[in-house]
Image: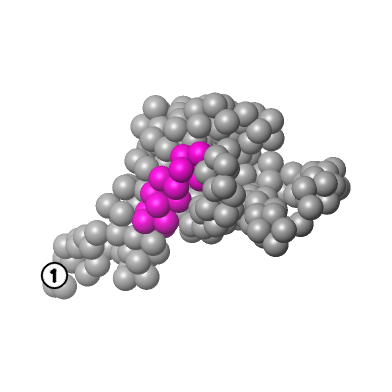
Amino acid sequence: MEATTLADRLQNKVAGVCLIAGVLLWAPTTFFEYSEGMLFGAGAFGVLIYALLIPGLLGIARMLRPGAPRLSVVAGQLATFGCVAGGTFQAALLHEWAARAAGTPEAMVAAIMAVTEGRVFPVLLILGIQFPISLLTLSIGLFRTGVAPVWVATLLGIGALAFPVGHIGSIQVVQHVAETTLLVPLVWLGLQSLHGATPRSVAVPASA
């Protein structure tokens, strides 16, 4: 008899692939964001990243379920809300690219971005800050449950704290440092999800 159902294995596999793919796209996306003429790539890859991270982070939350069920649910909700807001932030880059590509005068683009940053982004920030909070919550859950080595939980927590500093402050170096710090534990956890997708069997005692 299989220890896990086919649906569980497929869910773990999807979570692992999405998590690894999402975090590997972080570095080039940040590079594009600060490079001349690469705004479309930054926006497109950015939206894709957060779409991939939703199932990926939910996969980590499921790892916590046996030992910390409440924390698992809270972390999953925070990750979902945070990823939606993160994707919306990245979509703003696509709107900016479209305005520039359409030949909108630079003064008008600057005025639109000023309104966006002053009125729209603060609203999105309320949801967006939940993304690093979800990473910190997952880090705490990994510490509590012991489903991952201490170094994985530690790096995840450090990266979660550095992430908003770089992104809210638009500090490219800090963004790269935070993303690299998160890359290692999240890829490790993604590989664990893939390993969990491997069929395993358990012996069933013969009936008397």
Find the magenta span and give its range: 15-31
| Neighbourhood count class around disc 1 (C-alpha, 10 Å): few under 14, some 14–19, many 20 upward | few
Is residue 17 covered in magenta? yes
- Viewer-side residue, 141 vs 55: 55
Give residue 24's position: percent from left, percent from top.
41, 45
In the rendered view, tell whether residue 158 sits above or below residue 190: above
Q: At 66% across and 58% down in the image, what residue appears?
A: 101
What colouring style does the render use?
one colour
> In which quarter of the view is residue 136 placed?
top right
Q: Amino acid at mark 1?
A: Ala
Quadrant where the image shows the C terminus: bottom left
Q: Is residue 168 left or right of residue 121?
A: left
Q: Is residue 28 left or right of residue 121?
A: left
- Viewer-side residue, 206 vs 7: 7
Q: Main secondary structure of the magenta part?
A: helix
Q: How many marks?
A: 1
Residue 143 appears anywhere in the view: no
- Viewer-side residue, 29 vs 2: 29
Q: At 57% across and 42% down in the image, what residue appears?
A: 36
Give residue 117's position: percent from left, percent from top.
79, 44
Q: At 39% across and 61% down in the image, what residue appears?
A: 14
Helix, strand or loop for disc 1: loop
Give residue 182's position: percent from left, percent from top.
46, 35
Is residue 197 covered in magenta? no
Residue 17 appears anywhere in the view: yes
> In which quarter of the view is residue 187 placed?
top left
Q: Is residue 16 left or right of residue 143?
A: left
Give residue 47's position: percent from left, percent from top.
57, 56
Q: At 36% across and 56% down in the image, what residue appears?
A: 17
Residue behind mark 1: 206
